[in-house]
Amino acid sequence: MSDRTPPAVHLHIGGERLADGSGGAFDHIDPATGTVNARIPLADARDVDNAVATAHAAYDSWRRTPPPIRRACLTRLAELIEANADEFARRGAMDNGMPVAMAGAGVAISAEWTRYYAGWADKIAGEVTGQPLYDGELGYTLRQPFGVIGVVITWNGPLISLAMKVPAAIAAGNTVVVKPSEMTPFVPELFMDLVDEAGIPPGVINMLPGTAEAGNHLVTHELVKKVTFTGGPATATRILEACAPSMKPVVLELGGKSANIVLEDADIATACQHAAFLSVGMMTGQGCAFPTRLLVQASVYDQVVDSVVAAAGSIVTGDPFNPTTIAGPVVNEAAVDRIMGMIDRAESDGARLVYGGNRVDRDGYFIEPTVFADVDPASELAQTEVFGPVLAITKFGTDDEAIEIANSTEYGLSGYIQTRDLKRAIRIAAELDTGEVLINGAANLAVHRPFGGKGISGVGKEGGRAGIDEFLQTKSVGVGLA
């Protein structure tokens, strides 16, 4: 897999593939080389109006489409995602530097999310609420779609983000307009090719990379009845402000500063490999739910630090097209500057740099896997999402101290616990102020589990039954029988 030729990117509105957008064009930069590799058409407000009108026109027919047909279309889409795993990997390497060796897991997760929500399409049901013999009334509820959903995704995992939002929305009978990041246009382009091949009718899913103006216009458009967004708290705040006047509902999947608690009775070797891979290896640390704080019980602290350093040292950083590469580049030069600034300040704040800490001397946006020990829980490094390959290790004494440190940030997305004592783990899990807790290596983003945070980590859920409930409204009906 050495072909680095980028595909043409289009605005997808209804059945049309538009090579030009009214918002101009964007120079896409390959993060592995730092050079421009494509010009990406951008939508503006006029294109958004067109896409939303198209989605609105398709909505009535799609919501009346028999659920088994919706299920069949999504099942076919899941099969096509799996069948195109190699091409998704190739495009992901060009999009944001995701190593081809690491992309397979993301494709498998995305196919499974699509297949899971295909299975929900024909299982949407209300309930009987009245008691005819006593109330003289038959009461029941209807579960109905909203209409057009505005979908805004960020750059770090475009395929996974699409799979976490779009299948649930359309399985419920909604139509969608998606604004992907202009920094990752190639994977969404293939996704739309497969949408067409799967037989999903034109207008049900529309895709248009666009300007900031386009994103704002999508969020505020009167025909967009709900917004689902993946990104950072600052943009989410602006979305909330934009939706407030009309009380438009939102789902916000935001950042995290997740704590990974290693208790003294854990399988240390496994816990350290897990800690290093999911913080400074996988996606080069550019993931919202990654365990970027490692809280270690004092009796095993030195052993864990040494083992994590060894594991970090085994992570191969380099060309994302090289099959041995685990960590690729970060997304752009601005990310390099931000991450390196946090590394420099962490050292000034007294954290002990035990591995990495440098920009890699090569073209592109590469940073060494970086590990700090003795990190103050109140410091910037422990309180602020880095979104890069940097791990903060902190010592604790008791379980209660670990819980207090874990809960000491404004974030509340994920928590991790490593221990052989499941009774202990379950007690700690109940006390962590997070949307999810993963114990002893439980997989991230399992579709049957609702995913979503608290605090500045977000609002609403993706995954599980809760994920399709986000795209359904409840209407109650009462029938007088007197």
Image (spheres, grey):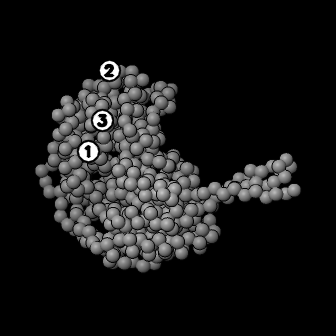
Q: Which residue is mark 2?
A: 299
Q: Which residue is mark 1?
A: 389
Amino acid on which the number 1 mark rests in the picture: Pro
Do callouts 2 and 1 mark residues in contact (Cβ within 8 Å)? no
> Looking at this view, is 391 or 14 the one in front?
14
Amino acid on which the number 3 mark rests in the picture: Ala
Give the image location of residue 384, x and y in percent: 30, 40
Residue depth check, mark 3 versus mark 2: number of the one nearer the observer: 3
SS type, badge 3: helix
The first of marks 2 and 1 along the sequence is 2
Q: In the displayed structure, does residue 209 sit left or right of residue 220?
A: left
**Residue at image coords 41%, 36%:** 416
**Residue at image coords 37%, 49%:** 233
The first of marks 3 and 2 along the sequence is 2
Residue depth check, mark 2 versus mark 1: number of the one nearer the observer: 1
> Looking at this view, is 195 or 54 the one in front?
54
Give the image location of residue 129, x and y in percent: 74, 50
Q: In the displayed structure, does residue 119 sit left or right of residue 241?
A: right
Circle number at residue 382: 3
Amino acid on which the number 2 mark rests in the picture: Ser
